[in-house]
Image (cartoon, rainbow, N blue to C red):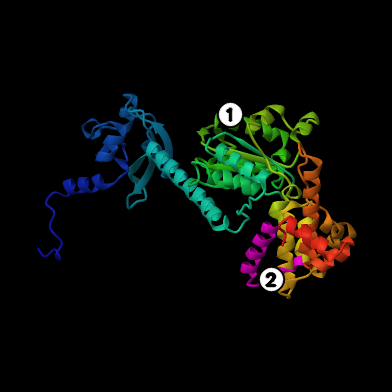
Amino acid sequence: MDTGGVPKIKNVEIFFDKILDVFYDGIYITDSRGVTIKVNEMYEKLTGLKKEELLGRKVTDLEKAGVFDSPLNPIVVKTGKPQTSVQVNKTGRKVVVNGHPVFDEGGKVAYVVTYVRDVTVLSQLKDEISVQRELIQKYHHEAQYLRTKNFGQTHAVIESPKMIKLMDLLKRIAQTDTTVLILGETGVGKDVFARKIHEHSSRRDEPFFKINCATIPENLIESELFGYDPGAFSGASAKGKPGYFELADKGTLFLDEIGELPLSMQAKLLRVLQDQEVMRIGSTKVKKVDVRFVAATNRNLEAAIKEGDFRSDLYYRLHVAVLEIPPLRERTEEIIPLIDYFLDKFNTKYKKKMIFSQEAKQLLKFYRWPGNVREMENLIQGLIVTRDEEILQMQDLPSYLLTNQNKNNLFQPLPMNIEEKPLSEIMDEFEKSLLENALNTHGKTSSLAKMFHVNHSTIFRKLKKYNLI
């Protein structure tokens, strides 16, 4: 007989068994009476039961014998609808059991096919997917950091003795894993020094994350720091989300404006600092983390403790290695180098070639910069964006810089250290500073002689004395 090229199968029964053994699910088939007619190899592995124990026997008898917990077959035959249950079998495995009816030509249930899936394996796959998702989120945050880290002010100008000493201390501290507290006025560059700590540490190749405690709403800060599990609260992502404590694992987390952290979160942060353990919102699982913490504030935390706004135990936990960054007015040696740095930075960014006139530069040098480095950066960026002239003159500067007080500061000597110095040396330093400022502003010795009401030879001799010409 012609079979159309299809090979003739002598024993369909054996062939059918081999097909069932291909499936990854356990398969158990009964007829309408509940008699077991087919069992595949995976079912044997999942349940620990052998075909010989099952074939030809009714599921109701197997249930009475304690082989099954609560078989679905009788319910499927009775209702004619699929049924699902979760069971624990004799091997201790937790399995999902799905029973499906197969109907004859008259619409009656002829067979019941039951699929058995190991929940243990499904849970492992779910956990693996969750871990992979967290890694993707972590790498996404790291990629964002790598893309943006070169656009911030990561350059630190170190010229003054105070800052040289501070950088030496920073490098020593960075080599340890201790928590660091950075103090300083707004705009002094605390974030720059936090990044420097990371760059000089053994964690330099791991992620660095910054979170500003003052800008995140109080009702969101816990989920940002600790993360949350799926469905932890209304509006939560169905996939859950890792917090910054987890994302910064093996790296550094910079908590800026730590003085603005709500009291309720201060207690939780203290526990993380002490135990290096976190628990997501909605979870009961504790995760170990390995994070180096750097905190910063412009607040007086000791005063905040007295006012009841800051926990003393958290303060002492943070107050281990302290870096206090002086304001820009106390490191005047860095004002001109910083001006040059920002000019170069924004000229490059906006494809311009602007410079300050000598007079304008001197005015900026003796301005007190209450907003510190950030004020300078914003000022120079604004001038380069809004002006067309290549040389920025005095009149191009904001009006608040052109007050009589600031103009007079051009001729105020720089702050001097007068401790343990004789009067003659103090007077020489004062005179040198005064002449240097005036020379930088006017440039001509004749103008200086006229301004100070002395003859030209006197000015010339004094400038020679101090090696100013």
Taking the image as drawn, is residue 35 in sight? no
- Magenta stretch contains residue 42: no
- Residue located beneath label 2 in the image: 354
Instruction: Residue 344 in the image: state x and y as whole percent.
Output: 63, 65
Question: Which residue, given by chain and number where applicable, does mark 1 sit on?
Answer: 274
Q: Amino acid at mark 1?
A: Gln
Identify which residue is drawn at 42% across, 35% down: 86
x%, y% of residue 132? 44, 47
Residue at 68% in and 35% down = 265
> From which residue to which does the magenta span run?
336-358
Q: Nearer the viewer, residue 428 or 90?
A: 428
Frontmost residue, 411 versus 216: 411
| Furthest residue toward left | 1
The residue most toward the top is 65
Residue mark closest to the camera, 1 vs 2: 2
Q: Is residue 373 above or below residue 227?
A: below
* Residue 98 figure quarter: top left
